[in-house]
Each structure stands twice: as structure tokens, then as C-alpha cells.
Image: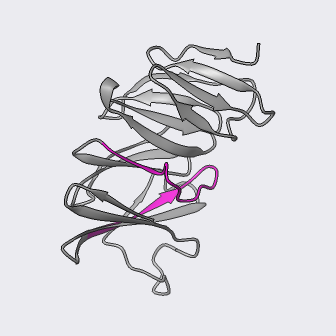
Amino acid sequence: MNRVFGNYEVTLRDEPVYFRNSADNPRAYIHEYCRSDEYRHVSAHGVSVRENDETLASAILLGVGGATGVNENSVAFDGESLYMTSGDALYSLSLPSLELNWCVKVDFATCFGVFWLKERSCLLTWGELEIGCYTKTGEKIWSSSGPDIFTEGLELQENIATVTDFKGDVHSINLSNGEIYSANT
């Protein structure tokens, strides 16, 4: 998947056969980041930055917790930094160098996506068990969980995030304070 942020073309890809310290990996990366070295990674997401057909940087994000894949919501950009999800974590990377700014665990299981909420100057994470709001420096503002896992989608409106759980129940979350209520009732 390719995205353009300013003058930079950013490419994201799943690297399902990536192994640490292996010469047999399909691609080499300048940086390798993992939230925890205690566990074997279950997801590997590669990212590279190009400008004028020249590769400037590359990194591999090794996710622990639940497995994730690269999707349209795997990356957000605030004008300065990239924010990417892999496994149960959210990573902040400098653009274009892809140096690690910080990494935080944002869900007990898996994080499906991240959204930059420009009007609120914060990040919203969509996890399997939690919807969270974070500052640009990775500080948690609030998080909300529901009665079941949030696997069926997330939609953003002006002040509300609407998320659907595994049972098909729809929940609305106030983006100001994280208050959650069932939209089915």
C-alpha cells in the first residue's frame, strides 16, 4: 500500500515471513522496532520512505499480542510524524528518517487502526478491546471498552466514533471524554 505525505511516498507492506537476524528475509530494513522482546512477534509490517525515486529510510515494526495486517487504517500522519499500528501497539516514527519517537501498548489484544483527529490534535486508536485517545507524545487521554470485541468496523463523525462489535451491536463513543453508550437501544 502506498500513501503520499507531503513530498514523501510511504510504502507499507505485510512481511509475514520476516524473522529477526535472518539473511533469508525478502527485504532488509534499516530499523527494526518491537514493543517487547519478551515475546515472539506475530505481525511484521514494513515501511519505507522515498523522495524523488530515492529510498530515504525503512523500518520493520514487529507486533506482539494479536496478529494484524496492513490496511488503510494502519497509518496516520499529523504533518510531522507517522503513526502506525502493529499487533497491540501504536508506534510514532519521525518522517522521513523513520526514527522511533515512542511506542505504546494500546490494546490488550490487537490494534486494527489509528486515526489523526486534526481538529482535536489527538490520535484515536481502534483496538479489538479498546477505543483509545492519545496525545502526539503517546500519553493516554482516555480509553473505552464495550461488552464484546470491536471487530466489525469503526466510523468517525464530528464528535462521535461509532464502532460495531462482534455481535453486530453498535456503540457510540464521545470523542471528548470516551463515554460509550449502545446505539442499539
Image coordinates for residue 16, horizontal then vertical, percent:
58, 71
* Image-based side of 64 in relation to 23, left or right: right
Q: Residue furthest right?
A: 167
Which residue does the image show at 52% across and 64% down from the upper left? 44
> Where, quadrant-wise, is the N terminus in this rendering?
bottom left
Residue 20 lies left or right of residue 41; in this view the side is: left
Instruction: Please give left or right for residue 133 compared with residue 122 in the image.
Output: right
The residue at 44%/27% (across/down) is 133
Q: Is residue 77 above or below residue 140?
A: below
What segment carries the magenta color? 57-77
Residue 173 seen in this snapshot = yes
Residue at x-position 58% and y-position 59%:
69
Dividing the image into 4 quarters, which one contains the C terminus? top right
Give whichever of 130, 169 is nearer the camera.
Answer: 169
User: Compared to 125, does 82 lie above or below?
Assistant: below
The picture places residue 158, in percent across and down from the top left corner, at: 44, 23
Q: Nearer the viewer, residue 88 or 37?
A: 88
Q: Quadrant of residue 6?
A: bottom left
Q: Is residue 107 visible?
A: no
